[in-house]
Image (spheres, rainbow, N blue to C red):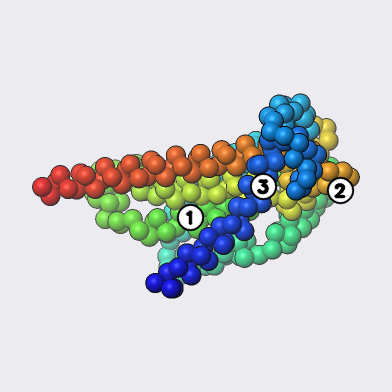
Amino acid sequence: MVKKILGQCYIWLIMIFMYAPVMLLVIFSFTNSKIIGANQWNGFTFQLYADLWHEEELLRALGNTIIIAICAAVVSTVLGTMGAIGAFYSRRKMRKTIDSVTQIPIANAEIVMALSLTLLFVFVGQKIIGHDILGFWTLLIGHTVLAVPFVYTSVKPKLEQMDQSLYEAAIDLGCTPRQALNKVIIPEVMPGIMSGFFLSITLSLDDVVITEFTRGPGLLSEPGSIETLSTYIQSVIKRSAIPPAARALVSLIFLSVVIGVAVVTIVKSNKASKLVARKGHFHG
């Protein structure tokens, strides 16, 4: 009993440390004070949410962030899923090699990856193409390289849990390998694919190091360097205080994540309940 209470207290303590700063930010998004502090509450108001739509630089950074995150997530999900399926059906030695190589970017420091990508892009631009190539495409490649290993590790366990006889049965029943892939393997590993997709979006949204090293002119920041939310906040902190409207934007992002998680949880719960009900009806 004592261990259970201590365990619950430990969990709640960790939760408080994790979410207290976020909740403080959300609370102060409903007051127009320029800084956050114990004596800085100026009354309840939605003024920051109204001011948010007049912060052009902040909205431009948000637009760039969303575009890059979605594009990188789509590319990473496709490549990571294809790589996981290809490695799973490869020979054992090759599979182990691919698994080991895939773990390196996850364990490696981002600064190493960012610097190596930058050197590669500069070399290709100056020595092969003849001009600077840093821009949207190099930034997209950087975010894709960052996210692909995480998609791979999300899809791989689902492949291992899958009943291998399903694919063989589909082939025996006349499906081509491509048809069996689309009708059997992809639906079976779809939870892993979706997990990898949303994880890729998250990684892209809050990345600073790779973005700072691989960005260039393009997107909504043309002709200046691409500004994402992370690089924008970092640059603003160096010269002044963060715009109060940023608190409203962060609160909206947090609220969107909470709603998304709630919807996914409810959908999964309903599916599990229906599955249990069907099994009970079948046995009955």
Q: Which residue is mark 1?
A: 154
Seen in the picture, residue 211 relative to 251 is either above or below; the reply is below
Along the line of sight, the residue nearer the viewer: 49 or 94: 49
At label 2, counting other C-alpha atoms closer than 10 Å, the crowd grade (few under 14, some 14-19, many 20 or more) is few
- Percent position of residue 283, x then y: 12, 49
Q: Earlier in the sequence, mark 2 or mark 3?
A: 3
The nearer-to-camera label among 2 and 3 is 3
Which quadrant of the structure image shows residue 85?
bottom left
Q: Residue at x 73, y 62 (%)?
A: 112
Please say whether residue 232 is visible from this viewpoint: no
In three-dimensional space, the C-alpha distance between marks 2 and 3, rounded to whole angstroms, equals 23 Å
Helix, strand or loop at disc 3?
helix
Q: Earlier in the sequence, mark 3 or mark 1?
A: 3
Q: Which residue is mark 2?
A: 238
Q: Which residue is mark 3?
A: 24
Which quadrant of the structure image shows residue 136?
top right
Q: Amino acid at mark 3?
A: Leu
Along the line of sight, the residue nearer the viewer: 274 or 47: 47
Q: Earlier in the sequence, mark 2 or mark 1?
A: 1
